[in-house]
Image (tube, rainbow, N blue to C red):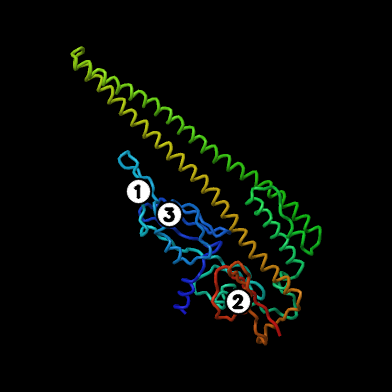
Amino acid sequence: MVGTAATAQDRYLIGPGDRLSVTFLANPTYDRQVQVGIDGAVHLPLLGELNVGGQTINELREQIPSLMTGAVYRERVNGEYLLVSIEPEEVLIDVVEYRPVYFDGAINSPGQQSFQIGMTVRQGIAAASGLAIADQGSISGSELRNHPRVLMADLIGLLAEMAVHEAILAGSDELDLSDLQALNAPADLIEEAIALARSQVQTSGDILSEEITFLDTSVQEAEARVIAALRHEETMTEIAETEAAEVERVEGLVARRIVSSELLTTTRRLYLQAIERLGDVQAERLEAEASRRELVLERNQAMRERALEIQARLQELSQQVAQLRVRIELSSAVPTTVALDEAPTTVPRIVIFRQIGGQSQEIDARPDTLLLPGDVVNVSFRN
């Protein structure tokens, strides 16, 4: 099983919701943990945006030498900024957290479970508190939760939340309500969910606008400091050039014995002072530019992380919607129950719903079937 699990890990294709760890041994300040977006992309320090979806972790590692070509960072040493290149062997990439797996149907604790390499259906069911065996003489809490009306209300809520997150991600106040309106559900439930969703998207939009305004203001202030530093540098450059010309003029006068060498010494001292002040001003300008770049990166990273959070939530909601649709379909059939004092006379049917290459596949599984991140596992009893 260990060898099989290791092979499965090596072959696993990175997908939305997975969390990657990027370590820069030479400069830990750039270390990050990033979540793969719904589009399969991540934003990595010094590398920018990179599409990692559909690749194994080994394939991603093999790209590091080409990705790091020309990658440098600035490091201040003794008051001077130096460009430091990054060697490929100094960059480590790993998957630190996989997408969860989801269990529903005849399960005591339906919902998501953390994925572990080598996890089987049996282990997942055990983590979800085992199979649910109902008493024929009563209606269990599980049966109540699986009532079609309850499931439909849950589905309406999830679809409304998805519409809100999709609108925020698109930067729009308009909600895509097509999935909600296509449901065969009570109109009052749908209208109530739509009204709540519109209120939420407006509130979220206002909060996001405030955050963006704050970040943009910080960047604008940094740009103003850069412009001021550039103007100061221009002034000091003109002064230094003037002092240099004065030194040249006095040198000519001294050569013709028109003025004393003491004047030349004074003139040269003034020139050196001007050059020193110019160096200080240039250092201030470089520092202002570095501050601006850091703020721009911080703003872009904050917006990127917010988008990734929304994408991760959308991925989670999409999985939950898929589960609910299956449960609603299954709830239309008469459930098979087993009395507590009797041994089960039926074998549970285990179905894995798995996304492969953008296509959803339905897989009949066994207890020892290996799971993959993002799997939705449905368990039901049948005669």
In front of the other: label 3 or label 1? 1
Residue 142 falls left or right of residue 226: right
Label 3 sits on a secondary structure element that is loop
Q: Position of residue 28 (x, y in %)?
A: 39, 53
Provide the residue designation for mark 3: 31
Q: Relative to residue 42, is residue 127 depicted above or below?
A: below
Q: Relative to residue 207, is residue 241 depicted above or below?
A: above
Q: Amino acid at mark 2?
A: Gly
Q: Which mark is residue 258?
A: none
Label 2 sits on a secondary structure element that is loop
In front of the other: label 3 or label 2? 3
Residue 347 falls left or right of residue 46: right
Callout 2–callout 1 Cβ contact below 8 Å: no
- Of 172 and 346, nearer the camera is 172
Provide the residue designation for mark 1: 84
Residue 184 falls left or right of residue 6: right
Q: CA distance from mark 2 to mark 1?
A: 55 Å
In front of the other: label 2 or label 1? 1
Residue occupying image coordinates x 60% and y 55%: 310
For marks 3 and 2, the one nearer the N-term is: 3
Q: Position of residue 330 (x, y in %)?
A: 72, 74
Other-residue count near label 3 (Cα within 10 Å), few / some / many at <14 / 14–19 / ≥20: some
